[in-house]
Amino acid sequence: MGNHHKNLLNNLEQLRKAAGLTQQELSESAEVSRKSINAIENGIYVPSTVLALKIAKTLSCSVEDLFALP
């Protein structure tokens, strides 16, 4: 399965935009590259628990708001 999970529901892009952040701004806050944020938004990469928690904290939401299994 690797880091890709085709059934993972991903709301990162919508929540990031609603927070008024660019991919670069979010990446700096989460201490990852902008390419990592882009890969997560496009469903290419599933973030680690630590990274998901950092993103959720930056966006003031829960990990479940960002990602869910159907």
Image (cartoon, helix red, strand yellow):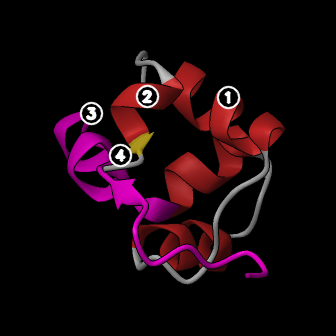
Query: Which amino acid, mark 2?
Result: Glu
Q: Residue 23 at what x, y percent from top left?
A: 46, 62
Which of the two marks, 2 or 1, is nearer to us in this view? Answer: 2
What segment is highlighted magenta in the picture? Answer: 1-23
Task: Give the residue pinned by disc 2.
Answer: 64
Circles 3 and 1 in contact, beta carbons < 8 Å: no
Q: CA distance from mark 4 to mark 1?
A: 17 Å
The amino acid sitting under disc 3 is: Ala
Quadrant of residue 57 within the rendered picture: top right
Q: Nearer the viewer, residue 65 or 21?
A: 65
- CB under 8 Å between discs 2 and 1: no
Label drawn at residue 21: 4
Q: For the residues marked 2 and 3, what is the alpha-carbon distance in whole angstroms?
A: 17 Å
Q: Is residue 3 magenta?
A: yes
Give the image location of residue 42, x and y in percent: 41, 79
User: Which comes before the other along the chain, label 3 or label 1?
Assistant: 3
Q: Which residue is mark 3?
A: 19
Query: SS at mark 2?
Result: helix
Tally the marks: 4
Dot label at residue 53: 1
Q: CA distance from mark 2 to mark 1?
A: 10 Å
Q: Amino acid at mark 1?
A: Leu
Packing grade of label 2 (10 A; few <14, some 14-19, many >=20) is few
